[in-house]
Amino acid sequence: MTPVISSAMTGSDLLRELLPVCEREVNRHMTMTRDWNPHDYVPWDDGRNFAALGGVDWDPEQSTLSETAKAAMITNLLTEDNLPSYHRVIAENFSLDDAWGFWVGRWTAEEMRHSIVMRDYLVVTRGVDPVALEAARMQHMTGGFDPLPDDDGQRDHSFDMLYAVAYVSFQELATRVSHRNTGKACGDPIADRMLQRVAADENLHMLFYRNVVAGALDLVPDETMAAIYTIVSNFQMPGASMPNFRRNAVLIAKGGIYDLPQHLSDVVLPVLRKWRIFSRDDFGPLGQMYRERLAEFLEQMDVKVTRFEESRQRALERARRRGELPV
Ligand SMILES: [Fe+2]
Ligand SMILES: [Fe+2]
């Protein structure tokens, strides 16, 4: 049974107490970020009209992307498309006043650049079927996505803000890794440059959220630890509710774009290290209990990572024996 956390602090107290951290992080973000224009990253000369305007509709032959690159591009773009879902979660859990409100608007506007540039690139270069892409976007956005796990009726929802910032700390870093590797998988320097640009934004977003969580850990360590444990142990990439997600996720993992070993070593562990989760001495009994649960969860994940790597190695060897890969 999950113990109930009781704290004298309410959710709005927490936002007020964390406001100086938010202000500092907004200032840091605004000095580090740089504005860029999506149109500068798209090879417009490669474009031509579709049949509705007298041209030719999409044909699979027109795409130069591998199946892995297509799956990764579609998954990453649909993730960016679903911005309204994430905006809702952030806007509902942050205040829309002062620095919190500024961040909600600024972050949303930056995120929208990502879907603009990726869609323009894919449609102009005919990398994927634009009709299927639009149908998938409609389905995915209509369904929405809630990153916060269902609770067992015991979570104090006044602290949902902690769950939201813990989730995005990991998710922004996960999208950074995924965009970087997708850029390489496309085999096109223009796509690589575009996705490096997007990944650089994701890194700054991750820093904002990760530093807000660090501030929350200092302020309400036990409540924050509960949120971190819950998010890490229930983590799902936003793609989980997308059309063809299973097929695309297998291609993405097999292609080394985003897989369990990377999730553990490049996303989960570095963020936990920055928060000094396993060296802090300010947890009460509840925080310590959630930290122990987290340690157990990470051990189980480590076992799964080993199994994943072994099975990928076996699959590679089979492919080599069949002559599908160089020895
Ligand atoms: Fe993004
Ligand atoms: Fe982002």
Image: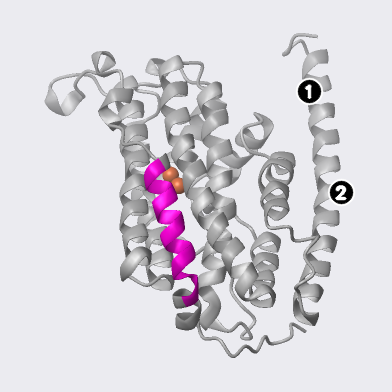
- Which residue is labeled 1 in the image? 316
Count of numbered circles on the image = 2
Q: Which residue type does callout 2 highlight? A: Val
- Which residue is labeled 2 in the image? 303
Place residue 167 in its image quadrant. bottom right
Give the position of the C terminus as an image quadrant. Answer: top right
Q: Which residue type does callout 1 highlight? A: Leu
* Residue 144 appears anywhere in the view: no
Q: Residue at x 53, y 49 (%)?
A: 207
* Dot placed on the residue nearer the N-terminal end, 1 or 2: 2
Q: Residue at x 55, y 22 (%)?
A: 184
* Residue 25 appears anywhere in the view: yes
Give the position of the N terminus as an image quadrant. Answer: bottom right
Front position among marks 1 and 2: 2
Range drawn in magenta: 17-31
- Residue 200 appears at what percent x and percent y? 47, 36
How many residues crowd around disc 2 within 10 Å: few (fewer than 14), some, or many (20 or more)? few
- Residue 293 appears at what percent x and percent y? 81, 68
Q: Element type at marker 2? A: helix
Q: Residue at x 45, y 15 (%)?
A: 189
